Image (cartoon, helix red, strand yellow):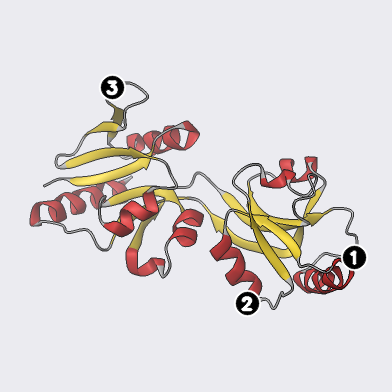
Amino acid sequence: MTLKLGVPSKGRLMEQTFEWFADHGLTLSRTGSDREYAGAIAGIDGMELVLLSAGEIPRELAAGRIDLGVTGTDLVQEKLPSWRRSVEPLTEMCFGHADLIIAVPSAWVDVDTLDDLDAAAAAFRLTHGFRLRIATKYHRLVRDFLREHGVADYQLVDSQGATEGTVKNETAEAIADITSTGDTLRANHLKVLSDGLILQSQATLFLSNVSQLSAQDRHTLELLRGLINKT
């Protein structure tokens, strides 16, 4: 058997993942064309590279179809209920940093905190007859966060495109989304609530807790741990 390592299949996240492993003594490479999703790993025996979308990796880890995977903390916690039972973070990789936040229109001068948002949501429902809409891709994380902070009278609406544009397009009144610099939020006249940080995310190497590892796989995993911890 071989240890299967899933990494993002395209973009800057793939490039940074390849660079990170190179810094730790392993060379990752795509085999074939950019449309193929197989790869190779040089520098350690007994490992196989699988290229997947970052969003697929948490579920593949949880199903045990890959043994290791590189993806964002946000995606793991959003897609995997009780995620700590399914995966174990081996190491944070110090790239792919982003914050999952709650943002509202900058024009809402009286709304700066979650308590303010709760009051605004109640007033919105009285005025308009329906709940204030928050556009997001992160339903589980946002719902848990708002429940923990006592925010009610809202509804989550799904956004799979440019979430920041939903307020301007009048399909939502607020958003919960990932941001790195805040530039896109400001360009869309949005501001982050002062206590609206849900999660700080970064690229992380995860180990599946459910994949079936042979004795040889466990030996390979210890060699990998040694490389990671040495540099």
Structural distance between the alpha carbons of marks 3 and 1: 56 Å
User: Which of the pair 71/219 is nearer the observer?
Assistant: 71
The picture places residue 119, in percent across and down from the top left corner, at: 83, 74
Q: Can residue 182 be seen?
A: no
User: What residue is disc 3 on?
Assistant: 32
Q: Mark 1: few, some, or many residues within 10 Å (few <14, many ≥20)?
A: few
The picture places residue 221, in percent across and down from the top left corner, at: 20, 52
Horizontal relation, residue 199 to residue 90: left or right:
right
> Type of residue at label 1?
Asp
User: Which of the pair 35/15 is nearer the observer?
Assistant: 35
User: What residue is disc 2 on?
Assistant: 148
Which residue is depicted at the point 28% across and 22% down? 32
Structural distance between the alpha carbons of marks 2 and 1: 22 Å
User: What residue is disc 1 on?
Assistant: 110
The quarter of the image holding the C terminus is top left
Which residue is depicted at the point 55% across and 48% down? 97
Structural distance between the alpha carbons of marks 3 and 2: 48 Å
The picture places residue 121, in percent across and down from the top left corner, at: 80, 70
Which residue is depicted at the point 33% across and 64% down? 86
Say which element carries label 1: loop
